[in-house]
Image: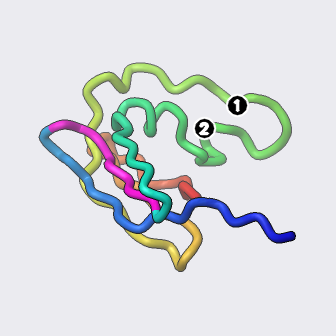
Amino acid sequence: MSETRPWPIELKVRRAARTLEIDFDDGAHFSLPAEYLRVMTPSAIDRGHGAGPGRTVNGKRNVGITDAQAIGRYATRLIFDDGHDTGLYS
């Protein structure tokens, strides 16, 4: 038995609202704050290169997303207005 996971079908950067909206093929919809996405970046610079929790990213309350770039069919790179552009969101 193969288990399928919901697949994102649309991403929208809402600059004024500082959110990323994601629609999935199962009908689910999420609106994620840029602050949350920036603080929880999967970037090795912030998460660390090995085991462990990595460092806490502080001071991102007013950060925004300037762009979202598709990386193949598996991830998205978010570009933040504080200059952060590493870390792939799968």
Q: Where is residue 33 in the image (x, y as percent from the top left)?
A: 34, 34
Q: Name the residue under label 2.
A: 46
Give yes or no for residue 84 being in the magenta stretch: no
Q: Which of marks 1 and 2 is nearer the N terminus?
A: 2
Q: Is 19 or 58 nearer to us in this picture?
A: 19
Helix, strand or loop: magenta stretch: strand
Please say if 18 is above or below 58.
Answer: below
Q: Name the residue under label 1.
A: 54
Query: Which amino acid is tagged 1?
Result: Gly
Q: Do the residues labelled 1 and 2 touch (CB within 8 Å)?
A: yes
Residue at 24% over, 38% down: 18
Q: Position of residue 49 (x, y in %)?
A: 76, 46
Q: What is the magenta range? A: 17-24
On screen, residue 24 above or below 55: below
- Pick the quarter of the image with the N terminus: bottom right
Colour theme: rainbow
Q: Which residue is drawn at 40% across and 55% down?
A: 78
Seen at 45% across and 39% down, the residue is 37
Kind of element beneath mark 2: helix
